[in-house]
Amino acid sequence: QVQLVESGGGLVQAGGSLRLSCAVSGRAFRIILIGWYRQVPEKQRDLVAGVHSDGSTSYADSVKGRFTISRDNAKNTVYLEMNRLNPEDTAVYYCNAKGYIGTLFYDQWGQGTQVTVSS
């Protein structure tokens, strides 16, 4: 099975920084895309940033230049460095990994971590 465990959320003032971590466990899990999404109440869950198996990255326009996604393959962990945070970044952040164990496809979510930015 595949499990994602997130950490690093919290309360920060506008202009501050946070780093989220997502540790992936799962024997022989071959990740093709891993990323971070965020969700506010009554809204859909939106992609914030993702990193593909080839190392290429993608970002939502609203976070470009402020957020950086990175992946440590040795630790099976993906990070989201968030800088110059503003109140509009307040949301529950979810880690998501898509990949295969053998021929079985997994689309796995973490439990979410709250990020609150005060003005």
Image (cartoon, helix red, strand yellow):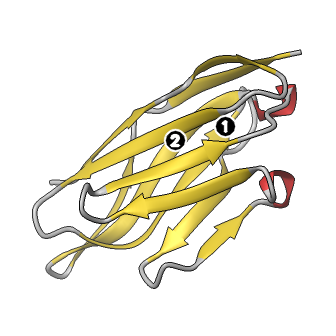
* Closest to the observer, 96 or 65: 65
Report the residue at 50% width, 60% height from top.
Answer: 70
Residue 81 in the image, given as x and y percentages of width and height: 60, 45
Residue under the image location 39 percent in, 44 percent down: 22
Q: Is residue 81 left or right of residue 78?
A: right
Residue 10 placement: quadrant: top right
- SS for dot 1: strand
Q: Which secondary structure, mark 2?
A: strand
- Determine the residue positioned at 61% across, 72% down: 57
Is 88 left, or right, of 57 in this rendering? Answer: right
Image height of 85 relative to 47, above or below: above
**Residue marked by disc 2:** 94
Residue 102 is labelled as none
Q: Measuring 57% from the left and 64% from the top, which residue is drawn there? A: 50
Up-down relation of residue 36 to residue 113 (above or below): below
x and y, in percent, of residue 25 in the image: 20, 51
Q: Amino acid at mark 2?
A: Tyr
Side of 86 where 44 appears, left or right: left
Where does label 1 land, which residue?
A: 39
Residue farthest to the left, as pictured: 27
x then y, percent, for residue 35: 52, 58
